[in-house]
Image (cartoon, rainbow, N blue to C red):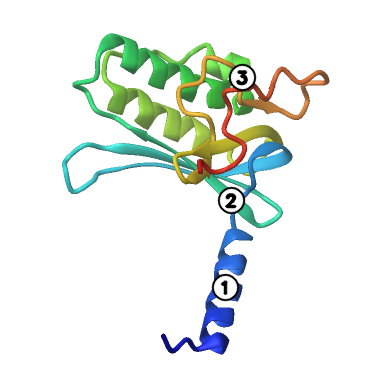
Amino acid sequence: MNLDIKALQEELESQSKSTQLFLTPGIHENAKLISVIVKPTPTGTDVLEMTFEKDGKKTYYTEWLDENKTEEAKKKVLMSVLQVLRAIVPKSILDTMVITDSLVDFAQKAVMVLNGFKNEALLRLKTVYVKDKVTVPLHSRYIWIENMTETESKIQIFPKDMMAPAA
C-alpha cells in the first residue's frame, strides 16, 4: 500500500478544524439563538431548524414537523419548542401564544416570535451526542435550555446523556 503521509496529515488537520466549528457536549453558558426557520424538505415534511452559537461554535436543533405523529410524539415536539420559547421570550408575550393541533402552524408562530428576540437573550444550553452528532437533547423531559438570568441552573447531565460518541 502506497500512502501519501502529507495528504493524510492535511486530511487530519482539516477534520480537526471542522470539529472546532461545533459545540462540544456539555453545558454552555452565554450561547445565543442565531437562526430559526421552518423549511420544506424534498419529502414534503416541513422541519423546524434552530441554530445556537457560542464563541463562533454552533449546534443545531432540528425537528421534523410530521403531522402524522402520534399525539404523544406531537406533545414531545411542543414541549421541546416551548423550552426554547420560555428561555427567550418574555412571559407576557408567551402567555398570548395559542397552541394549535398543527405542528407546522405552531412552529411558524414560534419562528415569528423567536425571530423578534434571537441574538438578544444569553442562554445556558446543554448539548449531547445524538447518534454521531452533537446537538441539544431531543424530546428531553428535562430542562436543556434556560436564560442566563436564572441564578440556579436546572440543567443537569444525566447518566443516559451521551457525552462521548458511541463506540
Quarter-wise, where is residue 47 in the image?
A: top left
- Side of 59 where 123 appears, left or right: right
Residue drawn at x 49%, y 46% is: 133
| Place of residue 20 in the rendered image (x, y in percent of width and height, measured from the top left) | 63, 60
Discs 1/2, front:
1
| Place of residue 63 in the rendered image (x, y in percent of width and height, measured from the top left) | 37, 33
Query: Tag 2 or tag 1, which sits nearer the N-term?
Result: 1
Report the residue marked by disc 1. Answer: 12
- Side of 5 where 46 appears, left or right: left
SS of the residue under disc 3: loop
In the image, residue 152 sits, relative to residue 48, either above or below, namely above
SS of the residue under disc 1: helix
User: In the rendered structure, which amino acid carries the disc numbered 2?
Assistant: Lys
Query: Tag 1 or tag 3, which sits nearer the N-term?
Result: 1
Residue drawn at x 40%, y 17% is: 76
Q: Give the label on residue 58, or none.
A: 2
Residue 20 visible to an observer of this rendering: yes
Quadrant where the N terminus is found in the figure = bottom left
Disc 3 from disc 1: Cα separation? 36 Å
Neighbourhood count class around disc 1 (C-alpha, 10 Å): few under 14, some 14–19, many 20 upward: few
Query: Tag 3 or tag 2, which sits nearer the N-term?
Result: 2
User: In the rendered structure, which amino acid carries the disc numbered 3?
Assistant: Ile
Residue 116 visible to an observer of this rendering: no
Neighbourhood count class around disc 3 (C-alpha, 10 Å): few under 14, some 14–19, many 20 upward: some
User: In the rendered structure, which amino acid carries the disc numbered 1?
Assistant: Leu
- Side of 19 where 156 appears, left or right: right
Comparing 156 with 149, the one in front is 156
Report the residue marked by disc 3. Answer: 143
Q: Are marks 1 and 2 in contact (CB under 8 Å)?
A: no
